[in-house]
Image (tube, rainbow, N blue to C red):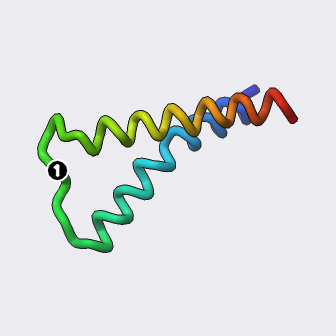
Amino acid sequence: MLRVLIVEILLFLVPFALYGAYLLLRRRPMPAKGSEERFWLVVAGLVSAIAGFVGLATF
């Protein structure tokens, strides 16, 4: 059960890590608070976590 929880947390955090790597490669500062990018990162994280739940339930 702990493994499943860790996998879901990692699936949620992947978009944030990719965006952070993108910012480091582009050498851009983090956007201001309340920016639209963070909203879409949360949406992408939730979608990947839900897809992980569906994938674990299916297989």
Q: Residue at x 31, y 35 (%)?
A: 39
For numbered disc 1, what is the local secondary structure?
A: loop
**23 lies above or below 56:** below
Q: 1 left or right of 19? A: right
Q: Residue at x 43, y 54 (%)?
A: 17
Crowding near the residue tagged with mark 1, few <14, some 14–19, many ≥20 C-alpha atoms within 10 Å: few
Q: Where, by quadrant of the figure, is residue 25 drawn?
A: bottom left
Q: Residue at x 58, y 42 (%)?
A: 11
Residue found at the far left of this picture: 32
Circle 1: residue type: Pro
Reading the image, the residue beneath label 1 is 31
Percent position of residue 38, x then y: 29, 40
Percent position of residue 26, x then y: 26, 72
**41 lies above or below 21:** above
Quadrant in which the N terminus is drawn = top right
Q: 15 left or right of 55? A: left
Q: Residue at x 54, y 34 (%)?
A: 47
Residue found at the far right of this picture: 59
Quadrant in which the C terminus is drawn = top right
Percent position of residue 27, x then y: 22, 71
Percent position of residue 31, x then y: 17, 50
Q: 52 left or right of 22? A: right
Q: Where, by quadrant of the figure, is residue 42 drawn?
A: top left
Q: 2 left or right of 42? A: right
